[in-house]
Image: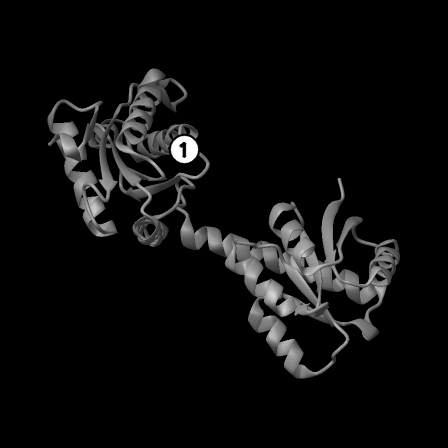
Amino acid sequence: MSRRILLIDDDRMQFRLTQAYFGSFHAETFALDWAGTYEDGLAKLLNGDYAACLLDYQLGERDGLALIHEAIGRGCRTPIVFLTADSSERVDILAMNAGALDYLVKGEISARTLERSLRYALKLGETLEALRQLATHDQLTSLLNRREFDRILAEECERSQRFGHPMALVMFDVDHFKSVNDTHGHPAGDTVLREVARRIASEVRSVDRVARFGGEEFAVVMMEADQAMASSTAQRICATVRRDPVLAKETLPLNITVSAGVALLPQDAQAGDALVVAADKALYAAKAAGRNRVIAFSEL
């Protein structure tokens, strides 16, 4: 299937010309979509599954630089190639500083230069995404790492307080994990952590954020969640983890359980650090009470 490229340009002739260029490409065939306004272009860029975007500088009363800033600010990671009739170095620098990965002057574009620019932007985009994954995700489990968890928690706590919406933090710990490593070795322990991470992630909403907090401890940040919802989710995760043995080796099924602690903002804490402390206290109360269970901070 051809990868989709989005052209945002208020000139329909530029769309037809770009289509003609695409027909002359040698290395790969792309499908070209078009948006003729700032608003339509931004919506498609944020909602569509595009491999890359070709973005014109002039878009009626608004410009492509503003669109880049707004799209990136709203989480867009699509590689962008900036197009302009202005050949000055000033526009080049502005485009690259805004977040474009390459820059083409319209009067100098050919099928060859456009294909090369797209290949470059796609490859650089893949490299940047890989680096983002390394910077924000745990290598063993592919969940968010501790640094990204801290950033998201602070951000969501601030948003929760600003708009008066509840949020919850659920902390999980794999029960008796040290004995898994001591008895069966660290490779078996790694398999357990990966499978527990997968089972936790399978039971949360798409808006919830799951992280490996450290060691055998995991965290779920739940937006717009009250205690009933958070505790119910934690109970469901505990049940999912214990339901089937984890196949740590080909002939080594292990019965694994987790304990969980639940804390809410603003009921149990007023900031991210305090919310972690509250959830952690509830978690260790669950472990002290016999493990394989959920306890909320309000129950202590």
Residue positioned 35% across, 51% down in the render: 159
Task: Evaluate whether residue 217 shows in this view.
Answer: no
Q: How crowded is mark 1: few (under 14 residues within 10 Å), some or many (20 or more)?
A: some
Q: What residue is shown with label 1?
A: 201
Which of the 4 image quarters holds residue 94?
bottom right
Residue 235: x, y in percent?
A: 29, 23
The amino acid beneath tag 1 is Ala
**Image height check: is 24 above or below 286?**
below
267 lies left or right of 110? left
Which of the 4 image quarters holds residue 207?
top left
114 lies left or right of 281? right
280 lies left or right of 11? left
Q: Nearer the viewer, residue 156 or 180?
A: 156
Residue 70: x, y in percent?
A: 56, 61
Q: Check the image and tell me how it is coloured.
A: one colour
In the rendered image, the quadrant that contains the N terminus is top right
Which of the 4 image quarters holds residue 267?
top left
